[in-house]
Amino acid sequence: MALRLAATGVDARYGAVRALNGASVTVEDGETVVLLGTNGNGKSTLMKCLMGIVRPVAGSIELEVDGTRHDLARLPTEEIVGLGVALVPEGRRLFPKLTVEENLMLGAFRKSARAQIATNLAFAYEAFPVLAERRRQLAGTMSGGQQQMLAIGRALMSSPRLLLVDEPSVGLSPLLVSQTITKIEELKKKFGLTVLMAEQNFHQAVRIADRGYIIVHGEIAFEGKTVAELQSNEIVKQLYLGGG
């Protein structure tokens, strides 16, 4: 049982605007890899490319699952989900007029996850007890932190092996950011997940990371093979640590 994601030389555009320029990242089985960058540098675009939401104009995206390689650049999103990849999107993207439980159930689209709906629902409620308490509440009436919990729980409903988390800190207080990042690490260990997290909050992201990348203007500007390498990098010092 092994998994490996490799995006190589990925270019992506929105019309005439180039969002990614030769971006390459790898994620090995069982890792937590962070994609660091400030707003507008291509983090979300790369995540969307990995999910088949945005099609790259150049480069390759390959997911190896248990010895079989899959070309994600050619697969529709539903087939990528079927391979065990789940996205927690930036801004949560919930269905505000559906209840908490209805939103969670929509996460169980993946065919192989349908037989585990009861188990996964119990896991989601165990991980986030407030969701169980508010299962009949409309998602749109919840706080930002509760909505983030719901978005993560919805992703878990698909029984993923690779969890993509896009900007989990957006719109949350510092305390909730810390709690959310900690919970992602707890869930990773409990479910045996591999995690790729795009985040601009450097200090919180590196708490749970094995290694990471820095993306600047759509290009991977630096690959840190350890958290220590990220912390000592000049780009990080300039962008996140107040200068070198």
Image (cartoon, grey):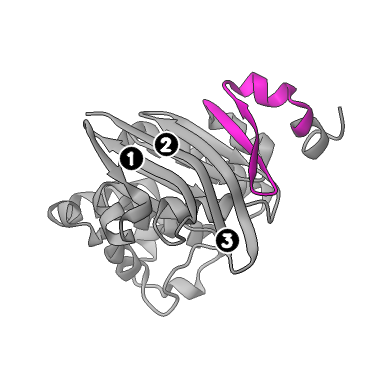
Report the mark closest to the observer, 1 or 3. 3
Q: Residues within 10 Å of mark 2 (few under 14, many from 20)?
A: some
Q: Residues within 10 Å of mark 1 (few under 14, many from 20)?
A: many
Earlier in the chain: of badge 1 and badge 3, it is: 3
Of all residues, the one furthest to the right in this rendering is: 243
Instruction: Give how far across and how far down residue 192 sits, in percent.
Output: 32, 32
Q: Is residue 167 visible?
A: no
Where residue 117 sits, quadrant-wise, is bottom left
The N terminus is located in which quarter? top left
Find disc 3 in the rendering and name its residue. Answer: 13
Mark 3, secondary structure of its residue: strand
Of all residues, the one furthest to the left in this rendering is: 115
Q: CA distance from mark 1 to mark 2?
A: 6 Å
From this view, report whether residue 66 is shown above or below residue 78: above
Which residue type carries mark 3?
A: Arg
Which residue type carries mark 2?
A: Ala
The answer to whether the residues at label 1 and label 2 have Cβ atoms under 8 Å apart is yes
Which one is in front, 181 or 86? Answer: 86
Where residue 108 sits, quadrant-wise, is bottom left
Instruction: Give how far across and how far down residue 127 sits, in percent.
Output: 37, 46
Q: Which residues are magenta?
A: 210-235
Question: Going 60% across and 34% down the picture, which residue do you hit?
Answer: 213
Q: CA distance from mark 3 to mark 2?
A: 20 Å
From this view, report whether residue 175 is shown above or below residue 213: below
Is residue 229 highlighted in magenta? yes
Left/right placement of residue 138 relative to residue 221 reads left
Which one is in front, 42 or 237? Answer: 42
Earlier in the chain: of badge 3 and badge 2, it is: 2
Question: Going 34% across and 59% down the picture, which residue do you hit?
Answer: 132
Find disc 1 in the rendering and name its residue. Answer: 63
